[in-house]
Image (spheres, helix red, strand yellow):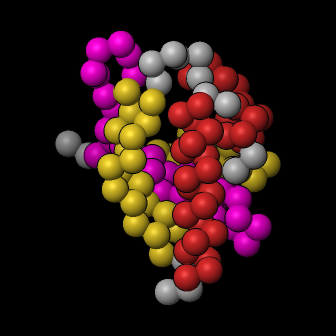
Amino acid sequence: MDKILSAQSEKAAQGQLDAYNQRDIEAFLSWYTEDVKVYDLDTDELRYKGKEEMRKRYSKTFQNEYLYCSLVNRMVLNRTVIDQESVKIDETDNRSEVIAIYDVNEEGLIECVRFSKGKA
């Protein structure tokens, strides 16, 4: 395991998580490549591609004043970060549980994300 690569990858995953919780779209997007790819891990389908599409989707998401993502568990191996996340989505304690896999490039930016809500 390359500790420098792992530290750089973890920094990107944590940076985007911190910006997500602050609902700061510009800071959030700064951790992603221009042509970032986002996949549904459960179906292996490409959900969307590109930072501008991500901006459209997350700008709406960030309007939710209750939005908050708690990190439950994290594993890091070189350029791959696997997070188990619990996302608060409303004024009650309703949460969405997800797994996010982040692939980080040589520049320390996330180039691919795969999300899973877990197969039933």
Task: Decide which of 97, 2 is in the foreground and name it.
Answer: 2
Point out residue 82 in the picture as x, y percentages from the top left corner.
43, 60
Image: magenta residue range: 89-118
Using residue 72 as the reference point, say whether residue 12 is left or right of it: right
Point out residue 14 in the picture as x, y percentages from the top left corner.
55, 53
Point out residue 91 in the picture as x, y percentages from the top left corner.
36, 13
Residue drawn at point x = 45 percent, y = 30 percent: 68
Q: Could you say which quadrant of the image residue 47 lies in? A: top right
Point out residue 34 in the picture as x, y percentages from the top left corner.
79, 48
Using residue 87 as the reference point, say whether residue 107 is left or right of it: right
Q: Is residue 12 visible?
A: yes
Residue drawn at point x = 29 percent, y = 46 percent: 118
Residue drawn at point x = 70 percent, y = 50 percent: 31
Q: Is residue 113 magenta?
A: yes
Q: Could you say which quadrant of the image residue 73 lies in? A: bottom left
Using residue 101 as the reference point, say whether residue 34 is left or right of it: right
**Which residue sits furthest left?**
120
Q: Measured along the vertical axis of the image, is residue 34 above or below residue 52?
A: below
Residue drawn at point x = 50 percent, y = 86 percent: 1
Q: Is residue 79 visible?
A: no
**Which residue sits furthest bottom?**
1
Q: Measured along the vertical axis of the image, is residue 106 above or below residue 70?
A: below
Image quadrant containing the C terminus: top left
Q: Measured along the vertical axis of the image, is residue 15 above or below residue 52?
A: below
